[in-house]
Image (cartoon, coloured by chain):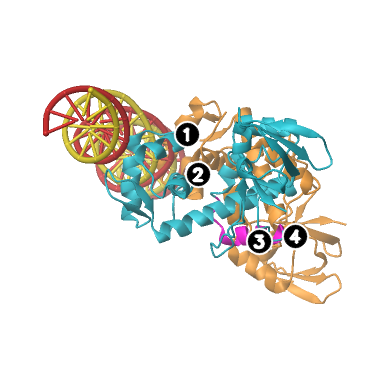
Chain colours: A orange, B cyan, C red, D yellow
Amino acid sequence: MHLTVSEENYIKAIFHLQEADGTVSTNQLAANIHTKPASVTDMLKKLTTKRLLLYKPYQGVRLSSEGRKLALGIVRKHRLWESFLVDKLQFGWDEVHEVAEELEHISSKKLVDKLDQFLGNPKFDPHGDPIPDSNGVMHAIMQVNLLDLKPHTKAEVCSVGSQSPELLELLKHKQILIGTRLEVHCKFEFDHSLEIQLEGRGKINISQQLAQALFVKTI
Amino acid sequence: MHLTVSEENYIKAIFHLQEADGTVSTNQLAANIHTKPASVTDMLKKLTTKRLLLYKPYQGVRLSSEGRKLALGIVRKHRLWESFLVDKLQFGWDEVHEVAEELEHISSKKLVDKLDQFLGNPKFDPHGDPIPDSNGVMHAIMQVNLLDLKPHTKAEVCSVGSQSPELLELLKHKQILIGTRLEVHCKFEFDHSLEIQLEGRGKINISQQLAQALFVKTI
DNA sequence: AAAAATATTTAGATTTGTCTAAAAATATTT
DNA sequence: AAATATTTTTAGACAAATCTAAATATTTTT
């Protein structure tokens, strides 16, 4: 099954949006892909005839099992390329997303599997997101939102909730990255902010908005 | 100046075809790019308005200096990716061309320069072709066709005249690759075949067609 | 230097992915 | 439950890159 770059972008967007909602609306997709709802409808019809989507007009859409398989392949490529850029080419983890958006559409299966091997079959990308294996199996980890962490639990940052430059700028400034270890000291009811202790460093304050964007695993 | 994949393919094809002829005809391009002459004419007009070509209807076409600069950028990417595939991912040198045709269209300048550095700034790709540097400077080497080599001269294979699978199959069978050292023993007038000695191995026969496809530098 | 052959361009159609504007379906408010 | 607002789809248009068929240039042959 050969897909165009545009078709792949729709499949990928639906995959990510349905993680949250189960089913995805036309407007949601249009906003995500920076296109108009009318264009989305056209593409949904096309991908449905290719049996990649389950789509009822006016009722939203989700991936068929075939569509999901393709989406996992694209996500795999995206995350492997991000790992390559950071681990081998010394890119900063906040500057790889755009380039990986291009590289994920390179079609050679052999290339992807050799790249995977070259990188040592990594299980997580530089943002802490899991990398599907060549069969499309993706190992989830027990991760919890920093906001939901109980005080006095030790944890390690393992993923971020978005790739927005604003978020990444703030994390860089606070020197928080994937793997950073911390412990929640106390939580404030007033503004839902946290005081946390960074391992080997001092105490800092984390706003509600920032805590919401950080996922950690307990250690 | 942003180009589509299709535009880049035209620019690259003209670059390679004009190496030989100086100027390139519509039919030549159509054959090379697997498209029809009418489509070529349209694209030539478009690229001319973008000031990348010097084109007079019915008179053939060549690259402007701006076009040449872009072509060198594409060739650079192609050859760096081929080097990556062979040196780092253990691809065979005969199976990288198609994948590199895709990778050469990835646009990030930073990616290319970091890749170059990661590979140790190689000067030649796995086929022995020179890799332009980031300023578009391409270092040629003194290379001569195997057919023109005088008997009893020692030489080293440094490039092949085509990437056809048939040629690559034959070279694989004879275990000739870039870097293989040899010495011409004698030449036969009848069929223009050669008898050569491979360094560290026995004597073999090379047909006129094969010799024509091999370029060597004397050592 | 005509005639014939070949090469190139023009004209008009097609496909893909997008758009705007208007119509239809669904959801929300009063 | 009517009226209003929102969401989604349909209809028709457009740009990019291609095609076929026909017209026009150029080159080669006689």
In the displayed structure, A13 sits above or below B113; it is above
Q: List x then y, in percent, for residue A156.
A: 82, 60
Three-letter code for the amino acid on which mark 4 is drawn: Leu
Per the image, the residue denoted by label 3 is B114
For the point 56% across and 40% down, which residue is it? A14
Q: List x then y, in percent, for residue A28.
A: 50, 46
Q: Nearer the viewer, mark 2 or mark 3?
A: 3
For the point 80% across and 61% down, which residue is it? A179
The alpha-carbon separation of the residues under discs 4 and 1 comes to 36 Å
User: Is B112 part of what is drawn in magenta?
Assistant: yes
Kindly indicate whether the residue at mark 1 contacts the one at mark 4 (C-beta within 8 angstroms).
no
Magenta residues (range): B106-119
**Chain label for disc 1:** A
Secondary structure under tag 3 reads helix
Kindly indicate whether the residue at mark 1 contacts the one at mark 3 (C-beta within 8 angstroms).
no
Secondary structure under tag 1 reads helix
Numbered label attached to residue A44: 1
